[in-house]
Image (cartoon, grey):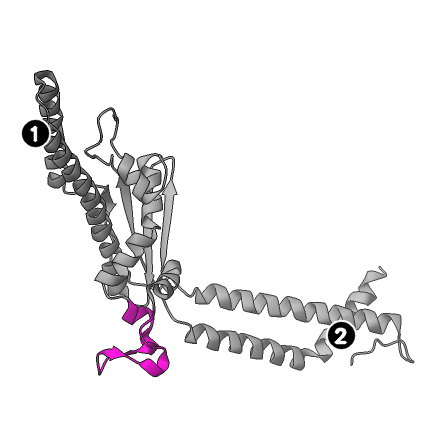
């Protein structure tokens, strides 16, 4: 029963300060609302990919999927093909290629680009370096991999819904082309090496072996060129989003209201305890 007077006193203190508390709560929520409304909205276009075996023309003695050279290029060590592709999508080479071919610097640094004059504004810093562009581009692209399903999810966040889809499509097209070009370059180098060895060999058994290797190399090279999707298959292609994914305005407003209310309760509790420990004449807690 001793708690009932305490609760009544606490509620009386809160009621006496209700106008101030409501005003503070409203001001904070209004500030958060203005900030949320002025934040740059982003749309997210996602797609699902399934890594495929990276067929390649390899050196004699190598077997299996034949991806040694691609792995050396992309991940620096031998690894499973799907892990290699995850690293590849986050690699500097692919990011720079996408930025360059799709001319994304203008969109990543709009304050430095003069659309009317079609040139970079020198007084604003001029054309950004590729390193600066990669740093801005990094949070715009998310790569996730599910080991259980072996599905790779590529998500692109962009201020424009249609452009988000275009950039996601660009990542898929340029990435697949880059992987294919690496494999073709390796294959052509191997075929040329076999031709050179055959022209310099006079032993019949060695010539037969080299001819067989040449046949296999040319066959693998033809297969690489003929595959429509070399590095991965697109299960769910990118689509144009119809709603913003960022910022989550409703969540921000709810959190702002809850946090402000909890802070106000904490301040009220502090005022009540201070007044309870140092009561003025008459025993009423200090409410100032």
Which one is in front, 274 or 121?
Answer: 121
Tally of numbered tags = 2
Task: Name the side, left or right, on which 274 lies relative to 19.
Answer: right
Q: Quadrant of residue 183?
A: top left
Q: Tell me how far mark 2 sits from mark 1, CA to CA.
A: 101 Å
Name the residue: 37% across, 66% down.
Answer: 132
- Residue 243 drawn above or below residue 23: above
The residue beneath circle 1 is: 199
Task: Name the side, left or right, on which 242 lies relative to 258.
Answer: left
Mark 2 or 1: in front is 1
| Residue 114 seen | no
Q: Quadrant of residue 80?
A: top left
Name the residue: 67% across, 71% down.
Answer: 264
The numbered dot on residue 235 is: none
Q: Which residues are magenta?
A: 105-128
Q: Secondary structure at mark 1?
A: helix
- Residue 208 drawn above or below residue 178: above
Name the residue: 61% across, 81% down.
Answer: 23
Q: Position of residue 113 (x, y in %)?
A: 29, 77
Q: Residues within 10 Å of mark 1 (few under 14, many from 20)?
A: few
Which one is in front, 73 or 39?
Answer: 73
* Residue 176 drawn in magenta: no
Q: Position of residue 210 (x, y in %)?
A: 12, 24
The residue beneath circle 2 is: 12
Name the residue: 26% across, 57% down.
Answer: 97
Task: Name the side, left or right, on which 131 lies relative to 240.
Answer: right
Q: Secondary structure at mark 2?
A: helix
Q: Quadrant of the C terminus?
A: bottom right
């Amino acid at each position: 029963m001793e708690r009932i007077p305490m609760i009544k006193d606490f509620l009386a203190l809160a009621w006496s300060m209700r106008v101030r508390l409501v005003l503070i709560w409203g001001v904070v929520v209004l500030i958060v609302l203005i900030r949320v409304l002025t934040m740059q909205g982003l749309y997210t276009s996602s797609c699902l990919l399934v890594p495929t075996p990276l067929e390649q023309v390899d050196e004699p003695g190598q077997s299996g999927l034949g991806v040694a050279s691609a792995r050396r290029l992309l991940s620096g060590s031998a690894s499973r093909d799907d892990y290699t592709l995850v690293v590849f999508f986050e690699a500097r080479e692919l990011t720079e290629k996408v930025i360059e071919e799709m001319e994304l610097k203008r969109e990543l640094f709009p304050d430095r680009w003069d659309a009317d004059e079609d040139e970079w504004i020198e007084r604003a810093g001029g054309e950004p370096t590729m390193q600066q562009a990669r740093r801005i581009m990094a949070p715009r692209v998310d790569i996730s991999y599910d080991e259980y399903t072996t599905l790779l999810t590529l998500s692109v966040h962009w201020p424009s819904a249609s452009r988000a889809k275009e950039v996601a499509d660009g990542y898929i097209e340029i990435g697949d082309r880059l992987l294919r070009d690496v494999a073709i370059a390796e294959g052509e180098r191997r075929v040329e090496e076999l031709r050179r060895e055959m022209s310099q060999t006079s032993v019949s058994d060695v010539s037969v072996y080299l001819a067989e290797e040449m046949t296999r190399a040319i066959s693998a090279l033809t297969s690489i060129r003929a595959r429509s999707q070399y590095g991965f298959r697109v299960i769910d292609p990118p689509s144009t989003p119809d709603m913003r994914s960022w910022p989550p305005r409703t969540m921000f407003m709810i959190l702002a209201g809850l946090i402000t209310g909890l802070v106000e309760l904490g301040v009220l509790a502090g005022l009540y305890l201070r007044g309870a420990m140092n009561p003025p004449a008459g025993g009423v807690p200090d409410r100032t």
